Image (cartoon, grey):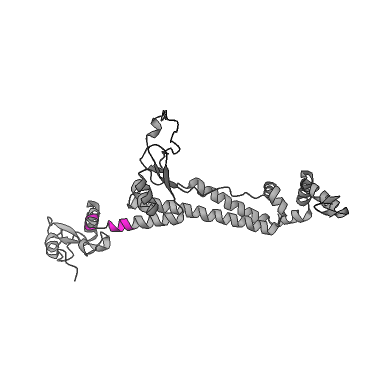
Amino acid sequence: MILNGVAGPFGFLLGLALVLGGNPIIWNYRKNKYFGSEEFQALRADATAVVKEHNEVIQYVEEIRAQGSFELGASASGQHAHLAAFENTSAWNNRRDRNVAEYAPHVHNASLQVVRNASVEPIKYLMKYFSIKPDQETLADVQRVATDISRLEEAIQNAHVREQDILSRMRPPAFILKRYSKEFWSLIGVELTPITVPYPRYKFQYVSAGGNSGQQVNITLDTPTLDALSEALAAKIRWAKSAAGQRALMTARLRNQIKTRDEHTCLHCGVSVAAEPHLLLEVDHIVPVSRGGLSTEENLQTLCWRCNRSKGAKLPS
């Protein structure tokens, strides 16, 4: 027998090995022999504790995935598109509707310029067109999503590392992982990690009127993007601490709280409501808002109207 230029008994044996090697019966025999070996049974017993801990991590991953809420803002473009039925009735031979606009809460249909700008400044345009407002509530929501995403990423990565550790302990033959991977993991008792991170994904989309052309920008809220979004929101909120913004924090409740703390007494001249029942007391910023003072308890004091008037916007001496 001649096989690729190899003659004689060696060529015959080589051809026989190649034929048998591709035979499912042979592979199944080898598989059963491996899984039934004392070596495999001993390795499986030794890995019991590792497998148990791994499966507990998988359960934890599932809990994070089930409990987490990964929704943030939404676009208003096309929010009622589902109420209409679109049909292209063009009689042209060449219909140019290869690109069809998509309408969904995480998709914003916009002009080509907006789409291109979004590719340059994704955070700015994400906030603007998906109603992610620079306020404390939104920032807390973004940070909550960022925490859930980060926890999930780390947990899944941890599970993958554990699976590789189990493989390094067991060292199964390559053909087992290639042909009988599911059976291998099942016999080991490992719960694999098919769970993926449900990243919020946003899209800026441009589709020409005739559908002949289209462009889009995709933004995935993974950990780096969420961190950048949090920083942008925090910067906006700090910027919003203007004089008007700080004065808006001065609620009636806060004023009464400061007066009660100071026992309804002017901290400058010492006159009190006990001595003058109709005394007009005011709450003053120790460091004026115009000088960067904040509406926090530490920077607020009770003054009678006279002392407050004479103080004006002066810094404390």
Total numbered badges shown on the rendered structure: 0
Residue at the limit of the structure toward the bottom, as seen here: 317
Residue 83 picture location, percent across and down: 39, 30
Q: Which residues are magenta?
A: 235-245
Q: Is residue 232 magenta?
A: no
Q: Is residue 130 visible?
A: no
Note whether residue 116 is visible: yes
Q: Quadrant of the C terminus?
A: bottom left
Which x, y percent locates residue 254? 25, 54
Residue under the point 68% across and 54% down? 48
Q: Is residue 237 magenta?
A: yes
Q: Tell me what residue is drawn at x 78 percent, y 54 percent.
A: 38
Position of residue 252 in the picture relative to residue 119 (left or right):
left
Q: Is residue 196 left or right of residue 255?
A: right
The image shows residue 130, relative to residue 296, as above or below, that is above
Residue 60 in picture, x, y percent from top left: 55, 51
Furthest toward the right, the residue is 9
